[in-house]
Amino acid sequence: MQVAEKSEKSAVRLSGLNGPRFRRFDVRAVPFRRLRAGFDSAETTENNRRHWAKADSMSADAAAGVEVRRTLRNRARYEVANNSYARGIVLTLANDTVGTGPRLQMLTDDAGMNRTVETEFHQWAQAVGLAEKLRTMRMARSQDGEAFAILVSNPRVDHAVRIDLQLIEAEQVTSPLRHVLDDHEVDGIVLDDYGTPVLYRVTMNHPGGPTWYSLDDFKTIPAESMIHVFRQDRPGQHRGIPEITPALPLFAQLRRFTLAVLAAAEAAADFAGILYTDAPANGEAESVEPMDLIELERNMLLTMPGGWKMSQVEPMQPATTYAEFKKEILNEIARCLNMPFNIAAGNSSGYNYASGRLDHQTYFKSIRVDQAFMASRILDRVLGAWLREYAVESQYRSLRGPLPAHQWFWDGFEHVDPSKEANAQETRLKNHTTTLAHEYARQGKDWEMELRQRAKEVALMKELGLPANEPKPAGTPAPASEPNTDEEDGDAVPGND
């Protein structure tokens, strides 16, 4: 009974917290404090107002609108076409990413089918120029922002499989006037309710060509036949902008500074000397025609008018900061592409071995990420279409199903010190911390093909009576009659790979 009364009293007291008397007491007893919190970067002051004037909250597609992308494409193409640094950076990025082209390795249980498919795909890739088209697509992503390729049937392909890649420029994928305001359409890309592209509208002729007009004919390409690649920087983005967009003003500054330095040097070289006088106006100095020119001859003495002196112009160009300015600008330009300065500038004179390796690690990782992106977005799409066509022309009907297990090999990167890399590779293999497949893959090679080739070479060497020079087991002592001077000096033994 006492417990019940106590609980009832507690309930009364708790219910009284919401009563008018307690609310009046609460307001009077507890001081009211306004919490002030924020970020300095969110404050708009007179000092940063102009800097943040163009910051907006537009969506990804609205920010990269038709006119914006057209302007960026035109400027990026102009800079790449006229600036040797921009041209070299874009070419180097494409060459390092694609190289001589990807190589296919099938990983199914049928070894015979694997070798046949790999050989046939390689021959088809050579027939259609797959490596060149991939390099062109990589350059288009840098200067145009995106690359488009249509999977077409080309009867002129010199292979049983007639599939080909038809590259088109970004301007050709656009919405006709009658579809500009359509819902679920972003500049030529028709989307479903989930934001996935289902159709692409492509002009029959290039908008910049002489035969194009505003009411030109369009063709509709299904998404299954269109390959569209770009770097998606924001969620909901469906069209790309040039990857060198942040560097476009820097390219302009670099060219302007170079031209200004050259103009200053030429202006200084045009004047051999200047006549000047310390006498006041209408003073004792003889009268001389202003801005008159005096031709000088070599090895001759020259007399000056009375009261006048000659001063030779000292050419102060190029300025001492010219080389440092170019280095800093190029370093900032290459940063948006994850490219180190020595690769962008083509100059490693200021590098040592350690700094070169350290800078290249970030660049090589970026290249591997880009290669994986191209493999999943381009090569797998091409391989799937190619296998479906090849299954019809060959005996391997099973290739009509899902994409079989496979992997792509790219060109490896040469080590700056091959001797150190070979020793490290040998150590990893002895410690079982790596495999031959991984080591060959780092060089862009198929380990099965390389081992088969090596077996053929060893067999032929034995047939001809030539020493095979197989590696000696670890710990094998050298013969007493042949002192191993190379190992004492820390060098590799000749003939041991």
Image (tube, rainbow, N blue to C red):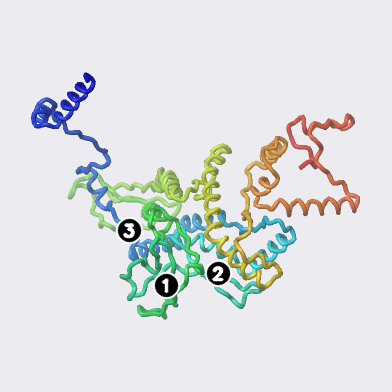
Q: How far apart are the two marked residues, 2 and 3, measured between alpha carbons?
A: 30 Å
- When asked about the image quadrant of residue 404, the answer is bottom right
Q: How far apart are the two marked residues, 1 and 3, measured between alpha carbons?
A: 21 Å
Give the residue pinned by disc 1: 201
Residue at 77%, 32% in the rendered image = 487
Q: Taking 232 as reference, is 48 above or below it?
A: above
Q: Nearer the viewer, mark 1 or mark 3?
A: 1
* Residue 331 at x, y percent in the picture: 45, 46
Q: Are marks 1 and 3 in contact (CB under 8 Å)?
A: no
Give the residue pinned by disc 2: 165
Q: Are marks 2 and 1 in contact (CB under 8 Å)?
A: no
| Amino acid at dot 2 | Leu
**Left-right relation of 341 to 291:** right
Report if residue 269 is visible in the image.
no
Residue 316 — which label? none
Residue at 23%, 54% in the rendered image = 287
Q: Taking 473 as reference, is 77 above or below it?
A: below
| Amino acid at dot 1 | Arg
Q: Earlier in the sequence, mark 2 or mark 1?
A: 2
Disc 2 crowd, CA 10 A, few/some/many (<14, 14-19, 20+) = many
Give the residue pinned by disc 3: 63
Q: Nearer the viewer, mark 2 or mark 1?
A: 1
The residue closer to the viewer here, 297 or 18, is 18
**Left-right relation of 137 to 47:** right
Q: Earlier in the sequence, mark 1 or mark 3?
A: 3
Residue at 28%, 57% in the rendered image = 291
Q: Are marks 2 and 3 in contact (CB under 8 Å)?
A: no
Residue at 65%, 68% in the rendered image = 124
Question: Secondary structure under badge 1?
Answer: strand
- When asked about the image quadrant of residue 18, the answer is top left
Q: Earlier in the sequence, mark 2 or mark 3?
A: 3
